[in-house]
Amino acid sequence: MADADLSLHPLALAFLERLPRQKAPDKQLHRRDDGRVVGDWVGLELSSAFQPIVNAEGRVVGHEAFLRSASDDDQGLSPWTLFSTATDDTRLIALDRLARTLHLLNALVVGNTLPLFLNVHGRLLAAVGDDHGRAFRRVVDALGVRPEHIVIETPVEASAQPDLLAFVLRNYRNNGFRVAVNVASAAQWQDIASAIHPHFVKIDSRKLGRGPEAHERLKWLSALREDATLIVTHIENASTDYQVGQSLQQGYAFGRPTAAPAQRSSVPSR
């Protein structure tokens, strides 16, 4: 994966300086004392966490952003529960775009210089009827970020609708973003590989097995579309089982989601 430069552009710096330093009733974003950006959604404070994605040498080559929430009287909601509270499409679209904007701003604040993987909710794919990515492209442009430094990631359920997924991915690519898909199994990727054109394909390590079986399965998956980089997720123990060609890895073995993403660090010794 080529390095990306998400350094703080003057446009982003100016935007951050205009954010209020405490929650304001007419603003969805504000900055905490530590400089990080938080969002406000129906009384919940939204924040960002970043998990590293590494190559075979253990070098951090990207980060996936995750949404965290908290409230004054409890620990907040899980992302799944949070999005389920958005019962209509308009609110879902607003929450999804707020989350991606929040993550991008926090990546800039903490000095992330690597490709940033941003998830879109599965319901959003059908809720947005025309040009997926156009609204977020305006946000990216306003912050002085080049869109190819952002990887838009679709959820696993989207891969069960290859026609819709192909349309969505084409829209995001036309808006300059790179794209990643999650697949439920090796068989599913085989079924849709000829119909969709992602830059990255993510698959859960638990769907691959371990040892020689996992290694051979990954080789086969890589051969299906050599222009798509495989990322094996949910790896809890560092292993060579999931190292094939240019494949990448993600999971607790290489780092948990944290507010300050690691930059090009090595994984723990095996």
Image (spheres, rainbow, N blue to C red):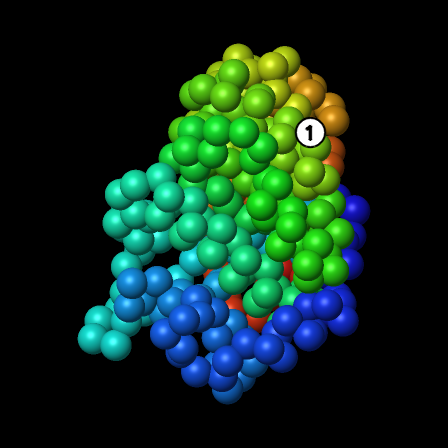
Q: In terms of depth relative to the viewer, which is nearer, 190 or 111?
A: 111
Q: In terms of depth relative to the viewer, which is nearer, 9 or 260?
A: 9
Q: Residue furthest front?
A: 26
Q: Residue at x 57, y 67 (%)?
A: 106
Query: In what quadrant of the picture does the N terminus appear?
Result: top right
Residue 183 seen from this side: no
Q: In terms of depth relative to the viewer, which is nearer, 208 or 65?
A: 65
Residue 189 is situated, as x and y percent measured from the top left of the image, at 54, 21
Residue 73 seen from this side: yes
Q: Residue at x 62, y 30 (%)?
A: 171
Q: Residue furthest left?
A: 73
* Residue receiving disc 1: 228
Q: Residues within 10 Å of mark 1 (few under 14, many from 20)?
A: many
* Residue 13, quarter of picture: bottom right
Q: Residue at x 59, y 48 (%)?
A: 136
Query: In what quadrant of the picture does the C terminus appear?
Result: bottom right
Q: How many marks?
A: 1
The residue type indicated by label 1 comes to Ala
Residue 175 is situated, as x and y percent measured from the top left of the image, at 69, 38
Residue 213 is situated, as x and y percent measured from the top left of the image, at 53, 25
Q: Residue at x 68, y 62 (%)?
A: 143
In the image, is 66 to the left or to the right of 74? right
In the image, is 76 to the left or to the right of 260? left
Residue 184 is situated, as x and y percent measured from the top left of the image, at 44, 27
Question: Height in image: 75 above or below 148?
Answer: below
